[in-house]
Amino acid sequence: MISSLEGRRILITRQAEQAASMCAFIHQLGGIPICVPVICFKSVALSCSEQSALRAQIRQAGWIIFTSRNSIDFLIEYRYMSDLLKKKKIATVGIQTAHRLEEIGLHADIVSRTFNVEMLVRTFREREIHEETIVIPHGSLANMSRFNELRLIGMQVYESTIYETIPDWQEKERLAEVVKSGSLDALTFASPSAVRFFTEMLDEHLWRQVLGSSTVVSIGDITAQTLTNLGYPPDVIPDRYTAMDMIRALERYY
């Protein structure tokens, strides 16, 4: 049976390493993945005293919350962090974040199965977990106000920015060439940052033209809202907020 993605050219805007499995899946379904990363990440250079403070906070904490695979990967770059995490209760936002923990030999005690911070906070409330110390390592563009409810139920919350999310300017010319070709059938966005950087890296008439003429796929509600605010609500949002489910949903859409 021929897939509805057969021959369709699908833009992947994720970082190259994170896009590999997504591209392979599109190939498997007969589609043509066009990988042009608009987003990249780099670690924040914490001073020795800042690293010491972060380690002390984690030692003291009852819980660690990870909101992405990146927050795990950048944290364990620091010495002794992996050993400290083995002794902690861990909560994750998203299934893929929990899977990343398993890959490094750790286990999530609470998993918000969708990429939804509010659902994770609700789980803490329902389980009557309160008066705990929580550490949340995160990226520079994370919206940490969503965790304020934890403070309202008596949690002491420490935040630490351990990586930066920035545009991949090296891909700017290639992105423009791909968009100008007029050959794209679908665009996929896995974060609000990807939408923002996509529009920053292109002239406005180009990004408006391609968003208006292509099928637009959003990984979830927050990214969808970012697109809607630009005037281009997505055509496709998967039930589960994962990259593979984005492609499955796109196949069903076609």
Image (cartoon, rainbow, N blue to C red):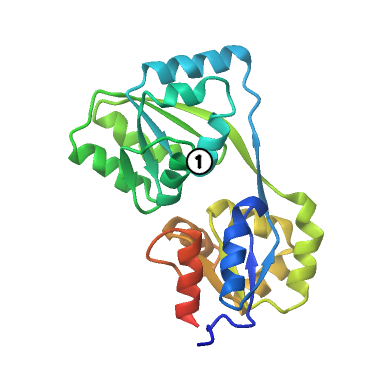
Residue in the foreground of this view, choosing between 69 and 82: 82
Amino acid type at circle 1 is: Ala
Q: In which quarter of the image is residue 31?
A: bottom right
Depicted 110 relative to depicted 16: above or below: above
Residue in the foreground of this view, choosing between 45 and 196: 45
The image position of residue 169, as x and y in percent, is 76, 50
The image position of residue 144, as x and y in percent, is 44, 37
Depicted 186 relative to depicted 47: above or below: below
Query: Which residue is tagged 1?
Result: 142
Say if residue 139 shows up in the picture: no
Q: Which residue is drawn at 68% across and 55% down?
A: 38
The image position of residue 163, as x and y in percent, is 60, 34
Q: Which residue is drawn at 49% across and 58% down?
A: 223
Say if residue 247 shows up in the picture: yes
Give the side of residue 213 with respect to residue 94, left or right.
right
Q: In which quarter of the image is residue 35?
A: bottom right
Badge 1 element: loop
Q: Residue at x 64, y 51 (%)?
A: 17
Give the side of residue 160 with respect to residue 40, left or right.
left
Label 1 neighbourhood size at 10 Å, few (<14), some (14-19), many (20+)? some
Depicted 234 relative to depicted 144: above or below: below
The image position of residue 53, as x and y in percent, is 50, 14
Number of numbered discs:
1
Residue in the foreground of this view, choosing between 66 and 227: 66
Q: Quadrant of residue 75?
A: top right
